[in-house]
Image: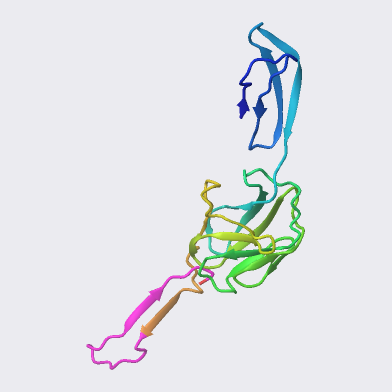
C-alpha cells in the first residue's frame, strides 16, 4: 500500500509518503512532480522481508484415493501474512495427527525423518528445505474425509488440511478398493438346521476389498 505525500514540498524541497506490504519482495518507487509534470530519474527501493513463523500450511494430494494408497502431505512454514518462512528448519520436531477411524495397524505415516507411532506420527527435527517438508499418510480402510494436522508443540505452531484461510481445504477421503475374492465372506446362520423343508438358514454375503 502506497500512501502519497499529504503536503507540498517544504523549504528544503522535500515531502514524504509511506509504503507497506504484506507480501515478501522488493518494490521500486518512482516519484513524479505533478506540478511540473516531471518524473524524477532516481528511484528508491524497499525490500519487504518475511516475518516470524506463525502457522503451518498443510495440504494433501491426492484428496480422493483407494484405501491402502498413500497421499502426500506438504507442510509449509508461513508467517502471519502467509509468506513462506524459508529459513524455518524445524528445530523442535513435529507431531503428525489425523482424525480418521483407522486402527494403529491401518494408519501408516512415512517419509524422510518420519516415525510411525500408530495413528499418529512424528517428523524429526530438521527435514525441512526452504521452509517446506513432505510426508506421506496411508489409510488401509475406507475412511474420510480425514483432517491431517502438523504441530510444533514447543513453538505452539500448528496447521491442518481443513484450514479455510488456505483455500482450498484438502481433507482426504479413502474409498473401498475392488472386491477381493479371498477377503470377502459367505456365512450361514445357523450352520445346522433340521431338514424339514421349512426351517431356514440365513446366508450372508459380505463383499470386501483386499484390506477387508
Q: Nearer the viewer, residue 86 or 72?
A: 86
Residue at image location 66% in from the left, 29% down from the top: 19
**Figure check: 7 above or below 156:** above
**Figure check: 170 above or below 204:** above
Residue at image location 63% in from the left, 60% down from the top: 150
State left or right for residue 28 relative to residue 141: right
Q: Where's residue 80, x and y in %?
A: 63, 47
Q: Nearer the viewer, residue 79 or 123?
A: 79
Q: Nearer the viewer, residue 70 or 109?
A: 109
Image quadrant in which you'd find residue 191: bottom left
Q: Where's residue 204, x and y in %?
A: 36, 78
Tell me how the rendering is colored.
Answer: rainbow
Please tell me whether the stretch drawn in magenta is mainly helix, strand or loop: loop
Q: Over which residues does the magenta segment extend?
A: 189-211
Q: Residue furthest bottom?
A: 194
State left or right for residue 45 relative to residue 178: right
Q: Where's residue 14, x and y in %?
A: 72, 17
Q: Where's residue 78, x and y in %?
A: 66, 48
**Figure check: 33 above or below 144:** above
Quarter of the image where the N terminus is located: top right
Q: Residue furthest front?
A: 11
Image quadrant in which you'd find residue 206: bottom left
Q: Residue furthest top?
A: 36
Q: Nearer the viewer, residue 160 or 12?
A: 12
- Magenta segment includes 201: yes
Can the viewer see residue 110 in this picture?
A: yes
Residue at image location 62% in from the left, 43% down from the top: 81
- Magenta segment includes 25: no
Can the viewer see residue 175 in this picture?
A: no
Amino acid at each position: 500500500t502506497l500512501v502519497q505525500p499529504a503536503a507540498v514540498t517544504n523549504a528544503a524541497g522535500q515531502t514524504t509518503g509511506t509504503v507497506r506490504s504484506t507480501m515478501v519482495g522488493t518494490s521500486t518507487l518512482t516519484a513524479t512532480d505533478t506540478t511540473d509534470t516531471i518524473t524524477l530519474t532516481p528511484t528508491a527501493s524497499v525490500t519487504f522481508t518475511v516475518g516470524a513463523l506463525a502457522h503451518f500450511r498443510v495440504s494433501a494430494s491426492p484428496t480422493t484415493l483407494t484405501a491402502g494408497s498413500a497421499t502426500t502431505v506438504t507442510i509449509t512454514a508461513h508467517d502471519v501474512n502467509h509468506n513462506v518462512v524459508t529459513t524455518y528448519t524445524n528445530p523442535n520436531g513435529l507431531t503428525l495427527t489425523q482424525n480418521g477411524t483407522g486402527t494403529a495397524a491401518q494408519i501408516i505415516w512415512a517419509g524422510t525423518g518420519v516415525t510411525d507411532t500408530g495413528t499418529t506420527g512424528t517428523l524429526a527435527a530438521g527435514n525441512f528445505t526452504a521452509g517446506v517438508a513432505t510426508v506421506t499418510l496411508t489409510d488401509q480402510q475406507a475412511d474420510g474425509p480425514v483432517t491431517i494436522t502438523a504441530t510444533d508443540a514447543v513453538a505452539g505452531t500448528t496447521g491442518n488440511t481443513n484450514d479455510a484461510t488456505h483455500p482450498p481445504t484438502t481433507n482426504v477421503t479413502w474409498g473401498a478398493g475392488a472386491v477381493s475374492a479371498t477377503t470377502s465372506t459367505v456365512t450361514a446362520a445357523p450352520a445346522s438346521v433340521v431338514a424339514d423343508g421349512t426351517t431356514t438358514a440365513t446366508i450372508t454375503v459380505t463383499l470386501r476389498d483386499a484390506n477387508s
